[in-house]
Image (cartoon, rainbow, N blue to C red):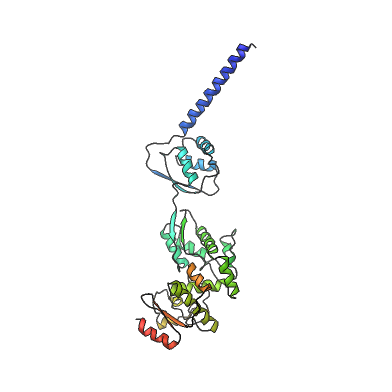
Amino acid sequence: MSKRRQHLLATAALVLSIAAVVAGAVWFFAELRPVNGGAEQRVTVTVLAGSGVRQISQQLEAAGLLRSRLAFELAVGLAGFSQQLQAGTFELSRSMSASEIARSIAQGAGVKEVVITVREGWTSRQIGEELEKQGLGRMADFVVAASSHDSRTILPDESFDFLAGRSSQATLEGYLFPDTYRFFPEARAVDVIRKMLANFGKKLTPDLRIVVTQQGRTLFDAVTLASIIEREVVSDIDRRKVADIFWRRLDAGIPLQSDATVNYVTGKNLLQPTLADTEVDSPYNTYKYRGLPPGPIGNPGLASITAVIRPEANTDLYFLTDAAGNVHYAKTFEEHLENKRKYLP
């Protein structure tokens, strides 16, 4: 074959290669274009954890958001997003290009999360009610999950060392840490509980755990008492003083006589329970039974837990909270009765 012929063939091959590249590029950029540039309606797509590029492209195609799955997958790879695509619920649009959609999912842009604030002292039922109100499942499902005596029955792959040493009849009440949380709309009751328990473990520092052990007390008792204090007083100094009073009463075998535990039994929210209320037969009624109740009456915040672990030593033995939230202390029962006459209706 002559050199001229070889040269012509090489030139032709080069031209064809360039043409193929140009055609491929034209196709690629054409397929990246929005499906409908004028569309304003948002399309919600939920990307599950562990989804790969191919699975995500299939979802997007099914939602009518892509001209070409292949073009989207190539765009993801070229942009370096292959390992960055995030799970979550996204609000996308058919007016977005495939590249814009890829960037949104990689950066978490457009993720719709539900923000929920769990108040200190709330019970699992109150938490469940708030979750249902915010569209995060049914209250009943959350209550059932939170009623588990062993977290491994609902979270078999998770281990929470702070749950050890509880009563065999204890539920997860008390350990669902109050805080502000963000959840994807598809979150299940167990997902919410997992995050709350993990938060409890994070907030209960090793230093606090060591102090509990050094005091010869159990964390379960500390959390139970903290749940009572959470509903009795509101300021940090009062929490610490009341914690010391309650510990000393427990050590001396004196009933706690906590109005909060009576209200927990009756479902009321009285500043001063009636005599009939204090006689209700329940192990949670600390007027009728000595010692701590069988378990927490709610989920205490860090301030109440810390107060129980590091109480403020004092010589009082009684206290009451008036309608304005002020706490009045007494060393004797007679002084306590006088405070009742002065400050309670």
Locate the N terminus and report the quarter of the image it occupies. Answer: top right
Relative horizontal placement of residue 137, taking residue 165 as reference (left or right): left
Residue 305 placement (x, y as % from top left): 51, 70
Q: Quadrant of residue 131?
A: bottom left
The residue at 46%/56% (across/down) is 182
Residue 323 placement (x, y as % from top left): 36, 76
Q: How many marks?
A: 0
In the figure, 52 relative to 10: above or below? below
Q: Nearer the viewer, residue 151 or 196?
A: 196
Residue 142 appears in the rendering: yes
In the figure, 295 relative to 1: above or below? below
Residue 272 placement (x, y as % from top left): 39, 79
Q: Quadrant of residue 233?
A: bottom left
Q: Nearer the viewer, residue 212 or 160?
A: 212
Residue 344 placement (x, y as % from top left): 36, 81
Residue 166 appears in the rendering: no
Q: Quadrant of residue 166?
A: bottom right
The residue at 57%/20% (across/down) is 13
Q: Find the residue positioned furthest to the left.
A: 345
Locate the C terminus and report the quarter of the image it occupies. Answer: bottom left
Q: Find the residue positioned furthest to the bottom.
A: 334
Relative horizontal placement of residue 172, taking residue 43 as reference (left or right): right
In the figure, 185 relative to 269: above or below? above
